[in-house]
Image: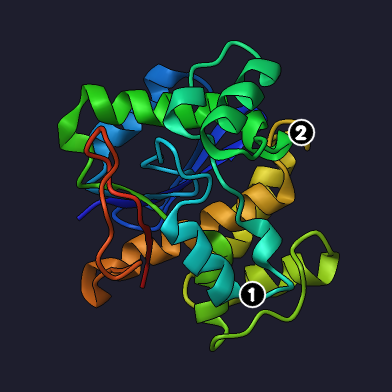
């Protein structure tokens, strides 16, 4: 089974695979993302899949915040509700969010709404992608790799090194990939935390072939478009 991890970045998307022939690639267009969805048998992606229509917070996000704890709950944000997904501006998305939920859409959520919209469109247009392109969350994966604890936040040098070492303990080539990607791409294209996040997603995707996948919640619901609202992990 060909597996990969994908994380969003300023340049588009960073894909890393440890299966078959380990490699990395920056996907700059929607067509390249679609080609990746076609190529791999399982992809773990750090992007919300499945959106509420009227509830501000998905159940999987609420439970994930509890799992990560107060210090890391801020790494989980509520994506836009589906009625606000195609709003032409942040002001209008805010209005729609408030109309349905009485809460405003965060700027962080709005900033990645174009990427959420891209993934959502690809999954709606290609039902065969839905069973193999699965939402995950790097901080949950790192926590489990570290025995249920996270010591340093990833916006610190120590936090980055620690996360890289957790992946490198299982895939030695991860350290090479991290260095090569840093050298090949500018920081305003691919940030260091984008790299470590895609590395752990790739590791979890590969390990899930033997270990299987779990979900938060255990019995996830689907949204109004049939998308599963769940965070996948090993």
Q: Is 210 placed left or right of 191 in the picture?
A: left
Position of the N terminus by quadrant: bottom left
Q: Is residue 60 above or below residue 17?
A: below
Q: Is 93 placed left or right of 212 in the picture?
A: right
Q: Nearer the viewer, residue 104 or 185?
A: 104
- Residue at x 77%, y 75% (from the top left corner): 152
Residue 184 place in picture, x, y as percent? 68, 36
Q: Is residue 167 visible?
A: no
Where, by quadrant of the figure, is residue 72 drawn? Answer: bottom right
- The circle drawn on residue 226 is none
Give me the C-alpha separation between circle 1 and circle 2.
22 Å
Q: Nearer the viewer, residue 154 or 62?
A: 62
Q: Name the residue carrying label 1.
A: 165
Q: Is residue 10 visible?
A: yes
- Residue at x 64%, y 48% (from the top left corner): 194
Q: Residues within 10 Å of mark 2 (few under 14, many from 20)?
A: few
Residue 131 place in picture, x, y as percent? 20, 47
Q: Is residue 77 above or below residue 152?
A: above
Q: Do the CB atoms of the residues marked 1 and 2 lie less than 8 Å apart? A: no
Residue 183 place in picture, x, y as percent? 73, 42
Where, by quadrant of the figure, is residue 37 drawn? Answer: top left
Tell me how the rendering is colored: rainbow
Q: Residues within 10 Å of mark 1 (few under 14, many from 20)?
A: some
Q: Which element is circle 2 on? A: loop
- Residue at x 56%, y 24% (from the top left corner): 96
Q: Which element is circle 1 on? A: helix
Q: Nearer the viewer, residue 64 or 150?
A: 64
Q: Nearer the viewer, residue 16 or 114?
A: 114
The residue lying furthest to the bottom in this view is: 147
Q: Name the residue carrying label 2.
A: 186
Q: Is 49 placed left or right of 124 in the picture?
A: right
- Residue at x 52%, y 62% (from the top left corner): 62
């Amino acid at each position: 089974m060909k597996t990969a991890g994908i994380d969003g970045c300023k340049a588009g998307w960073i894909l890393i695979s440890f299966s078959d022939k380990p490699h990395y690639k920056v996907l700059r267009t929607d067509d390249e993302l679609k080609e990746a969805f076609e190529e791999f048998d399982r992809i773990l992606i750090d992007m919300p899949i499945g959106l509420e229509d009227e509830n501000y917070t998905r159940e999987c996000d609420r439970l994930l915040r509890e799992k990560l704890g107060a210090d890391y709950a801020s790494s989980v944000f509520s994506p836009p509700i589906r009625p606000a997904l195609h709003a032409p501006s942040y002001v209008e998305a805010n209005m729609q969010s408030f109309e349905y939920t009485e809460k405003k859409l965060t700027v962080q959520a709005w900033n990645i709404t174009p990427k959420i919209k891209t993934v959502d469109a690809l999954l709606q247009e290609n039902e065969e992608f839905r069973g193999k392109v699965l939402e995950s969350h790097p901080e949950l994966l790192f926590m489990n790799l570290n025995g249920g604890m996270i010591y340093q936040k990833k916006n610190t040098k120590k936090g980055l090194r620690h996360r890289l070492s957790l992946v490198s303990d299982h895939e030695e080539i991860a350290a090479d990939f991290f260095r090569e990607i840093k050298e090949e791409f500018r920081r305003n294209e691919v940030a260091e935390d984008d790299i470590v996040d895609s590395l752990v997603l790739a590791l979890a995707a590969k390990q899930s072939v033997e270990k299987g996948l779990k979900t938060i919640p255990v019995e996830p619901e689907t949204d109004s478009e049939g998308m599963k609202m769940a965070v996948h992990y090993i």
